[in-house]
Image (cartoon, rainbow, N blue to C red):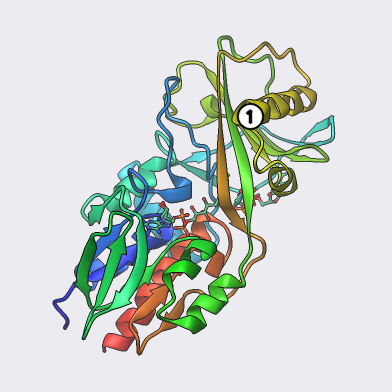
Amino acid sequence: MTTVPIAIIGTGIAGLSAAQALTKAGLVVHLFDKSRGPGGRAASKRSEVGHLDLGAQYFTARDRRFVAQLQQWQAQGVVAEWSPTLYSANGNALSLSPDEQVRWVGTPRMGAIGRELAKDLQAVYSCRIVEVFRGKQYWHLLDANNQSHGPFSHVVCAVPAPQATALLSAAPKLAAVAAGVKMDPTWAVALAFEQPLATDLQGCFVQGSPLDWLASNRSKPGHDATLDTWVLHASGEWSRQHIDLAREAVVDHLYGAFAEVANCPMPPPVFSLAHRWLYARPAGNHEWGALADADLGLYVCGDWCLSGRVEGAWLSGQEAARKLLEHLD
Ligand code: FAD
Ligand code: NAI
């Protein structure tokens, strides 16, 4: 079996899932990420009011392989069930919307999942890869500081489709598939209130508003926020239309939309922040699992290869690893 390590670009759930599966098979992987830590869109952001989950809010598990992983996380205390009082809103018509769906969150925050997956892996953070190129025999990566990394026997590219396109010039067919995947943006806003808002609303699916989701952090098991913090997500359409709006204006708009939806007294927040996810969700679902040019040794995974969900990302990473291992046999 090869002793030259495998490079994985991206330490989101997909890249970490691939890394776990390859390591389990006895291979050595080196991960790279432009962010300061693991988790990608399922990471948590540290703030003066505690950690905030600005990306993935919760996840569901439908595939039996992911259910098995979830049970392991549950045993490790990394995830817990979240059973919010769920509402749905259409414009400002708010109604209770209970259902039977089991939903999970990372504890004490979503970022715990990425941290658990990354804990025994070798990863370089704050390292943006700008090029994947082939030497005589092996692959090398070039980062934004002009440093090269390698050699690597294979490369797994686990980043959102538009970012993957730029890294796949050595495999034009894979690059063309990635280039055909559109990903929609999401503006996320966090608000903190000194006193708990007078509402029993804990999570709400929204239509007919700039928002499409809002949630109370304190309703989540183990959450560490001291104040009453909320996360609001704008719809893809509103986010696209306001993609370059100043952060303060985004906060004002979405706070206003929250006040209309929540139907309770809404004092001014004592803290707010806005975060723009440029590649938040794939515009549609695909059934690729993962993409591969096995002869070249290049593999591609990410939520956009399946469904734009935590489960889709994890399964895609497993699939990339499976395809790579199959070719080694
Ligand atoms: P990512 O998490 O995007 O990981 C890719 C990683 O690659 C990132 O860490 C990035 O920094 C890194 N990277 C990119 N380019 C480079 C480069 N050139 N060099 C080095 N590193 C690079 N899913 C759910 O199941 N439930 C939800 O409630 C939910 N809500 C969401 C809300 C929002 C606002 C967003 C944005 C997403 C949400 N999702 C939700 C989707 C879920 O977060 C994603 O499907 C999943 O986390 C994607 O994982 P990934 O590994 O495919 O990609
Ligand atoms: P899920 O089964 O809870 O939700 C799927 C969708 O079904 C929801 O978006 C909502 O439209 C609808 N829905 C579910 N329960 C409902 C209820 N009780 N009342 C009214 N509508 C309800 O979770 P799943 O399938 O795991 O999806 C993950 C979630 O992540 C979705 O809500 C999705 O919108 C969100 N997401 C958000 C992204 C963003 O950028 N804002 C990116 C990726 C996912």
* Disc 1 crowd, CA 10 A, few/some/many (<14, 14-19, 20+): some
Spot occupied by residue 101 in the image (x, y as percentages of width and height)? 63, 49
Name the residue beneath numbered marker 1.
202
The image quadrant where one finds the N terminus is: bottom left
- What amino acid does circle 1 point to? Gln
Spot occupied by residue 170 in the image (x, y as percentages of width and height)? 40, 80
Q: Which residue lies furthest to the left in this view?
A: 3
When the figure is inspected, residue 269 is found, relative to residue 285, above or below; the finding is above
Classify residue 204 by image quadrant: top right
When the figure is inspected, residue 320 is found, relative to residue 304, above or below; the finding is below
When the figure is inspected, residue 28 is found, relative to residue 226, above or below; the finding is below
Classify residue 28 by image quadrant: bottom left
Spot occupied by residue 106 in the image (x, y as percentages of width and height)? 43, 41
Classify residue 180 by image quadrant: bottom right
Residue 140 appears anywhere in the view: yes
Residue 19 appears anywhere in the view: no
268 vs 166, left or right, is right
Which is nearer the eye, 115 or 187? 187
The image quadrant where one finds the C terminus is: bottom left
188 vs 90, left or right, is left
Which is nearer the eye, 145 or 79? 145
Q: Dot 1: what SS? A: loop
Residue at 43 percent across and 81 percent down: it is: 171
Q: Residue furthest front?
A: 146
